[in-house]
Image (tube, grey):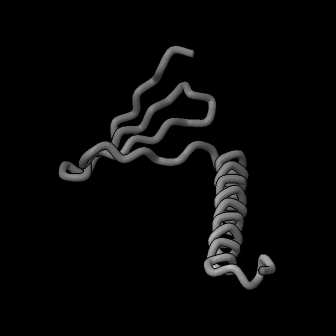
Amino acid sequence: MTAAARPGFRRRRRIVWISATALAVTVIVIAAIAAVNRLLGPPVIGVGQMPLALTPDGRTLYVADILGGTVAVISLKG
């Protein structure tokens, strides 16, 4: 009996192909996110109702109070 004639062979081959494709897509997405972070700086991190943003040099933190409509600027020691 050849490998192609065995029951389930094509299904296993299809699962391996789908897994390899998913891995390749994951790697591409991670590389794209890393490239965007290098170009634009770190992303805004949401914490509950108060989003935070840290400048690329890590010296200034912006904290937005959505309910109050204000932004607090906090200088951090480097």
The answer to whether residue 49 is left or right of residue 55 is left
Please provide percent x and percent y for residue 14.
Answer: 67, 76
Residue positioned 39% across, 41% down in the render: 52
**Residue in the image at 34% along x and 36% along y:** 72
Frontmost residue, 21 versus 9: 9
Pinpoint residue 7: horizontal percent, then vertical percent: 63, 81
Of the 4 image quadrants, the one containing the N terminus is bottom right
Query: Left or right: 38 with respect to 48?
Result: right
Position of residue 55 in the picture relative to residue 17 (left or right): left
Query: Disc count in the image?
Result: 0
Q: Farthest residue to the front: give it.
A: 1
Q: Residue furthest bottom?
A: 5
Q: Residue at x 19, y 52 (%)?
A: 67
Residue 56: where, in percent of width, then height? 61, 36
At a point 56% along the width and 28% down the height, the residue shown is: 58
Q: Is residue 67 left or right of residue 64?
A: left
Question: Measured along the vertical axis of the image, is residue 60 above or below residue 22?
Answer: above
